[in-house]
Image (tube, grey):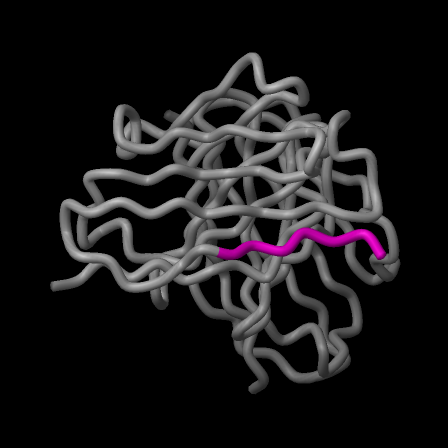
Amino acid sequence: EVQLVESGGGLVQPGGSLRLSCVASGFTFSSSWMHWVRQAPGKGLEWVSRITSDGSSTSYVDSVKGRFTTSRDNAKNTLHLQMSTLRADDTAVYYCARDHYGCFDLWGRGTLVTVSS
Amino acid sequence: EIVLTQSPGTLSLSPGERATLSCRASQSISGTYVAWYQQKPGQAPRLLIYGASSRATGIPDRFSGSGSGTDFTLTINRLEPEDFAVYYCQQSGSPPRTFGQGTKVEIK
C-alpha cells in the first residue's frame, strides 16, 4: 500500500525541541521530493519545508528558518523534521507529503505538535 | 510571496447543485503550478486538481479546474453528499509554496 505515516508529535514546552519522522512505503521514496506541511488548529494549510530526492537541497518557510531542519534517510524510507526553539505558534498538525509536479499528491495522516507550558 | 485569496469563504448549496470556487493570486502564475485540494474534518487533504486543470488519480469527472494568470476556478458539478468539505488552492510557481485560506462548501 502506498502510504506515509508520521510520528513523533506531542506536548513540548516553549523553547523545547522535537523530532518528527515520516515513514514511506509502497513507492520509490528515494526518487521523490518530500515536504512538510502544517495546519494550526482550526486554521488553513501552511507549507513548512521541502527536501530534494537525494537530500542535497532543502528550503523552508521564513517563520521556521534557523529553527527547523529537514533531512531524510533513503535507506530507511524515512523523512525527518527536527524542530527546535519551539513557539506557541508552531502548534499544529504536521503532515508529510510527496511532491508531484509542484503539488502534493500523497499525504500522511499527520502528527499533532502542541507547544505549551 | 504570492498570496492566494479564495472566495467565497463559505458556499451553502444543496446536493445536485453546482459549486464554483474562486482562487485569485496576488501576481500572475503559470497554470502549471496551481493545484486544488479537498479536506474533510479530521482527515488529511486530498489532491483533486494539478496543473490548474488535470484531475488527480481517482478523482471523479464532476471536479474540474480552469484558469490562468491570476484567476483560477474549481467547479464541482452535481454536488454529492461526500463533496461537502473545505477546499484549498495552492501555488508552486514562486517560492515559498502557498495555499489559499480555504472555501467551505456546506449543505444548505
At horizontal 63% and vertical 76% (from top left) the residue drawn is B84
B69 is within the stretch colored magenta? no
Q: Residue furthest left?
A: A117
Q: Quadrant of residue A10?
A: bottom left
Q: Which image quarter is the C terminus of chain B in?
A: bottom right
Q: Position of residue B28 (x, y in %)?
A: 52, 22
Q: Residue furthest front?
A: A75
Establish if B41 lies above or below B49. below
Magenta highlight: main SS: strand
Q: Quadrant of residue A109?
A: bottom right
Q: Out of A44 and A107, give the one closest to the viewer.
A: A107
At horizontal 71% and vertical 56% (from top left) the residue drawn is B75
Q: Position of residue A44 (x, y in %)?
A: 41, 55
Q: Out of B100 and B64, give the one closest to the viewer.
A: B100
In the image, B15: left or right of A16? right
Establish if A21 lies above or below B68. below
Establish if A113 lies above or below A32. below
Establish if A29 lies above or below B73. above
The stretch in magenta equals A1-7
Q: Which image quarter is the N terminus of chain B in?
A: top left
At horizontal 52% and vertical 51% (from top left) the residue drawn is A95
